[in-house]
C-alpha cells in the first residue's frame, strides 16, 4: 500500500506541475498570437492525443513522463512553404523579442504562482505543527553541555521567538531561519522566552554556524531538538516486557539505570540500545516513586528485502509500551493579505536558498550528493502524502519552486538558456546565430544528461 501511495503521490505532484508549467507557455503564446500545434505532457512518442480549439491544437500524453513541451509554429523546425499566409504572421520567430521572452518565461513563472497560491492557502487555513519550544540534546557521542546551543545559554523548555530579528512561532520557521544563517555563514541571534526569567538573548557565533555541515541535520548539530512532553506511559500492551515488569499507564518515567529521562524519545533510545538487558527504571506513580526491573525483548530489524538485502540485521530492544511523544502544537491562521505576503516571501526565500546551494555545489563548498532525482522526489512525495494534505501540498509547492528555478538556469535547451539568447538579442540588436545556438544546445543536452545520471546515482546510493 505504501508503494502505491508513493507512486500515486509522485504522479499527481509531477504530472500536475508539468502541466501547469506548459500551460504557462501555452496561454501566453496564445495571448501573443502565436499558433500552438501541440501541447504534450511527457516526452517522446505520443501515446494518446486529441485535437481541440479553433487552431485544432493537438493535446497529447507522451511515453516519457518526466517532462513536457508546447510545440509552436516555428520556422526552425520545418519548411513553412505549405503554411497558409494568414498563419505566417503567427510563427514564433517572427514575433518581437519581448513576446518571445514572455512566452518562454511564462512556464517558470506559472510554477512560482502555483507555489504562492498553495502557500497562501496553507497560511490562511493555518497549519498545525510543533511550536518553536526547544529541547537541548546532544548528538550521539557528544556531551549535551558542550553543544553550541548549551554554550550559547539555551536550555530545554526555552521558546525561541525570533532568529536574527525574524519572528518565529513554529518549529519549521525556526529550522528555516537557522538553515539560512548557516548557509549565509552568519551568527544566529536568538530571542528566547524562558519561564520564570522573561525574555533573554542567546547568540550562536558566525564561526560556529559556518562550520555546520550543510548536508546534515543543521539544527540537530547545534544541539537543538523540538521540545516534547514529559515521558508518561500512555499504553501498556498485554504480554510485553513492560506489563511483566509492572509498568502502568500514567507512570512518569524518571530515570533508567540512574540516567535521567528527558522525554519519550530519550526513553525509547535507551530501550532500543538494551536488547535482552535488564534496566532499573524509576517511575513516579501518584505520590510515590518505584523502581522496576524491565528487560527489553530483543528484536531483529531487517531491511525492506529482509535477508535478501545483504545487510546485517540490527537487534533492538522493545518493551511493548507507548510513551507520550507529541510536542506542543500550534495553529496560526493568517488573513488573506498577510497570507499572500508570507507566501511571496516564502517563495522568494526558497528561490534564494536554492540558488545559493547550487552556487555552493558549483564552487565545491557543498557536496554534489545534494543533487536529487526522481526516486528521492517520489519517496518524499509518498512520505508527505501519508503525513496529511497540508504536508503534501507544502511539498508540491516546494517542488514547483525547484522546477521553476531549475528551468531558469542559463543552460541551453532549458527556458533559462532561451532567455539568455533573447537577452543577448536585446543587447546586440540581432539574434544568436543558428550555428552558435546548435553548438550550445549540444553542450546543454550533455550537461543535462550528466546531471540526470548524477541524480539517479545519488538516489540509488541513498536507497542502498
Image (tube, helix red, strand yellow):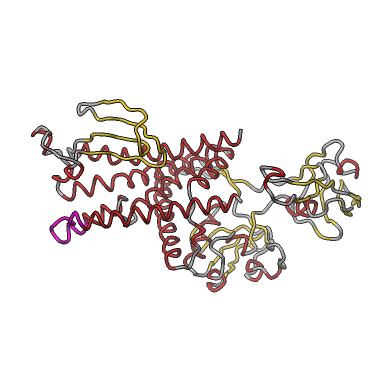
Image x and y of residue 250, in percent: 82, 43
Quarter of the image for residue 70 reads top left
Q: Is residue 131 above or below residue 54?
A: below
Between residue 262 and residue 21, name the one nearer to us. 21
Q: Identify the residue shown where x is 11% and y is 39%.
A: 89
Residue shown at 40%/41% (left/top)?
Answer: 117
Residue 196 forms part of the magenta stretch: no
Image point (33%, 55%), residue name: 444
Is 429 magenta? The answer is yes
Which residue appears at 67% of the width and 42% of the height? 305
Horizontally, residue 456 falls left or right of residue 74, namely: right
Residue stretch in magenta: 423-435
Please identify the quadrant where the N terminus is shown.
top right
Give the x, y percent position of residue 395: 49, 44
Q: Depth check: give the residue in front, 390 or 398.
A: 398
Residue 110 located left or right of residue 35 = right
Return the residue found at the far bottom: 207
Classify residue 198 by image quadrant. Answer: bottom right
259 sits left or right of 246 in the view: left
Exactly how many numbered labels are in the figure?
0
Q: Residue 396 at what x, y percent from top left?
A: 46, 42
Could you say where residue 437 lies in the image, as x and y percent from the top left? 23, 55
Q: Is residue 289 above or below residue 331?
A: below
Give the side of residue 408 with respect to residue 137, left or right: left
Establish if 193 lies above or below 336.
below
View extreme (left): residue: 85
What secondary structure is the magenta-colored segment mainly?
A: helix
Amino acid at each position: 500500500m505504501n508503494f502505491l501511495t508513493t507512486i500515486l503521490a509522485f504522479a499527481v505532484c509531477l504530472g500536475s506541475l508539468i502541466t501547469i508549467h506548459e500551460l504557462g507557455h501555452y496561454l501566453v503564446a496564445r495571448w501573443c498570437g502565436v499558433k500552438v500545434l501541440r501541447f504534450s505532457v511527457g516526452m517522446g512518442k505520443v501515446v494518446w492525443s486529441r485535437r481541440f480549439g479553433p487552431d485544432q491544437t493537438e493535446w497529447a500524453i507522451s511515453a516519457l513522463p518526466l517532462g513536457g513541451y508546447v510545440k509552436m509554429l516555428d520556422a526552425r523546425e520545418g519548411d513553412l512553404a505549405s503554411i497558409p499566409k494568414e498563419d505566417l504572421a503567427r510563427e514564433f520567430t517572427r514575433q518581437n523579442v519581448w513576446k518571445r521572452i514572455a512566452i518562454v518565461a511564462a512556464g517558470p513563472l506559472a510554477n512560482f504562482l502555483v507555489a504562492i497560491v498553495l502557500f497562501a492557502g496553507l497560511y490562511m487555513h493555518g497549519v498545525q505543527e510543533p511550536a518553536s519550544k526547544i529541547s537541548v540534546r546532544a548528538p550521539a557521542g557528544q556531551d549535551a553541555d558542550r553543544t553550541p546551543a548549551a554554550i550559547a545559554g539555551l536550555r530545554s523548555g526555552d521558546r525561541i521567538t525570533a532568529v536574527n530579528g525574524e519572528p518565529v512561532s513554529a518549529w519549521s520557521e525556526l529550522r528555516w531561519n537557522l538553515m539560512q544563517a548557516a548557509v549565509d555563514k552568519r551568527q544566529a541571534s536568538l530571542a528566547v522566552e524562558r519561564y520564570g526569567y522573561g525574555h533573554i538573548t542567546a547568540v550562536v557565533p558566525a564561526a560556529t554556524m559556518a562550520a555546520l555541515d550543510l548536508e546534515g541535520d543543521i539544527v540537530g548539530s547545534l544541539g537543538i531538538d523540538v521540545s516534547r512532553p514529559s515521558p508518561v506511559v500512555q499504553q501498556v500492551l498485554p504480554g510485553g516486557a513492560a506489563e511483566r515488569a509492572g509498568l502502568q499507564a500514567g507512570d512518569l518515567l524518571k530515570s533508567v539505570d540512574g540516567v535521567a529521562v528527558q522525554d519519550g524519545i530519550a526513553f525509547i533510545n535507551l530501550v532500543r540500545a538494551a536488547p535482552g538487558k535488564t534496566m532499573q527504571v524509576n517511575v513516579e506513580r501518584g505520590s510515590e516513586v518505584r523502581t522496576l526491573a524491565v528487560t527489553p525483548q530483543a528484536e531483529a530489524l531487517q531491511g525492506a528485502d529482509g535477508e535478501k538485502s545483504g545487510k546485517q540485521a540490527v537487534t533492538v530492544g522493545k518493551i511493548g509500551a507507548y510513551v507520550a511523544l507529541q510536542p506542543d502544537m500550534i495553529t496560526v491562521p493568517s488573513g488573506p493579505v498577510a497570507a499572500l505576503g508570507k507566501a511571496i516571501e516564502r517563495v522568494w526565500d526558497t528561490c534564494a536558498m536554492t540558488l545559493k546551494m547550487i552556487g555552493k555545489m558549483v564552487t565545491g563548498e557543498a557536496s554534489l550528493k545534494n543533487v536529487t532525482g526522481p526516486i528521492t522526489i517520489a519517496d518524499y512525495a509518498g512520505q508527505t502524502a501519508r503525513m496529511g494534505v497540508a504536508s503534501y501540498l507544502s511539498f508540491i509547492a516546494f517542488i514547483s519552486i525547484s522546477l521553476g528555478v531549475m528551468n531558469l538556469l542559463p543552460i541551453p535547451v532549458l527556458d533559462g538558456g532561451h532567455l539568455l539568447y533573447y537577452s543577448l538579442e536585446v543587447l546586440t540588436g540581432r539574434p544568436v546565430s543558428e550555428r552558435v545556438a546548435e553548438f550550445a544546445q549540444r553542450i546543454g543536452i550533455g550537461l543535462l544528461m550528466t546531471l540526470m545520471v548524477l541524480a539517479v546515482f545519488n538516489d540509488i546510493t541513498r536507497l542502498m
